Image (cartoon, helix red, strand yellow):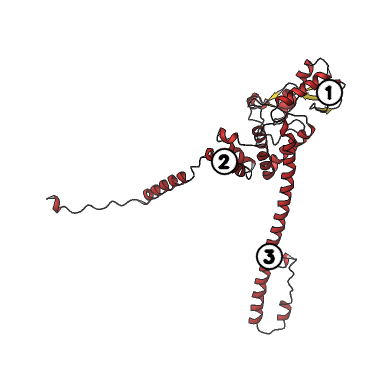
Amino acid sequence: MNNDQQPPRKKQRRSRRQGRRNRSASASSTATHRCNIGFNSLDDLSIDNIFSFLGSKTLRRVAFTSKYLMSKVTHEHVVRSAVISGGNSLSTMKEMVKLLKDNTILVPSPLRLLRLTNGLTCERGDLCQHRKNGNKPKKVNFIRPGYGVFVCWNCLTNDITAELKIGNAMLENPRILRATYGRRYYLFAEPFYDTSGERASAIVSVEELKSFNDETQAVEEHLRKMDEANVWSSKSSEIIACFETAVKDYGRRKKEQDIANEKRKNAALNKKIDRVKKVTEMVKETLPETPWKEFIFSCRYNKQISSCM
């Protein structure tokens, strides 16, 4: 048989699964192309506007995607995100603001503050007492009140703090972070560094106090040097002011939202009562006149009592 006399080939039918696969692949490629936004091309104002409306978890996920975005995180972004998120993030920020008002800790960097508001387990990592014993990392809800570190109780009592007897003249300085229990002070045993290498929390430790040889002037000099070395020391008042402003704004917005929700609830209830009234009137007109008809329809609707419905 010649080629001219051969019957035409049948078109191969594509299966539904293959068609769906092709469509999903094209859709995903299109979505990837559309969402391929370079954050490095955004100006500082745009990034500031985006970060100002993110919660703690979302801000952490976005910020830690690149070094460029990490460099754009500010204390104001972290404070706002903590207030927006509430819960443990807000509790951590409240405790941090207390310590900053007392001026007993080093002002944390924006990234450390962001890690603290998103913490889940002891920040000491492999040095944690639970990790050393072969257990899972110890869950921690928020920073230790009065200490400003995100550690478990075992690490705080066994490794981080040390006790001193009350009566040491150097401990009279109000900027020395300490906890009092009975006739003893509990201070940081040595300077505390987080996993990123940043010194955090207490400005003065027991190790440093012992090197001062009971000279109160040495303590003042050490505090002055630490303030100069801490590049974020000037941000303390800004963090406190931003937190107070954010809490007030959140309270105002919450009150407005509650009022709007109450209005919507009342409007829905009134609408429901109107519908019931229409149905009742329709049934009343349909039923014949009987002695019990007046008793049935003697109910009066009270808009303030939702149980009437």
Rendered-image quadrant of the C terminus:
bottom right
Q: Residue 267 carries which label?
A: 3
Furthest-left residue in view?
1
Query: How far from the left and from the top, in percent, is residue 47?
Result: 59, 41
Other-residue count near label 2 (Cα within 10 Å), few / some / many at <14 / 14–19 / ≥20:
few
Of the image marks 3 and 1, the number of the one nearer the N terminus: 1
Indicate the secondary structure of the residue bearing disc 3.
helix
Between 288 and 13, the one lying in front of the other is: 13
**Residue type, numbered disc 2:** Asp
Q: In which image quadrant can residue 158 be found? A: top right
Query: How far from the left and from the top, in percent, is residue 184?
Result: 84, 24
Between circles 3 and 1, the one closer to the viewer is: 1
**Residue type, numbered disc 3:** Ala
Q: Which residue is drawn at 74% across and 47% down?
A: 248
Q: In which image quadrant can residue 127 be found? A: top right
Q: Distance between the residues labelled 1 and 2?
A: 48 Å
Q: Which mark is residue 43?
A: 2
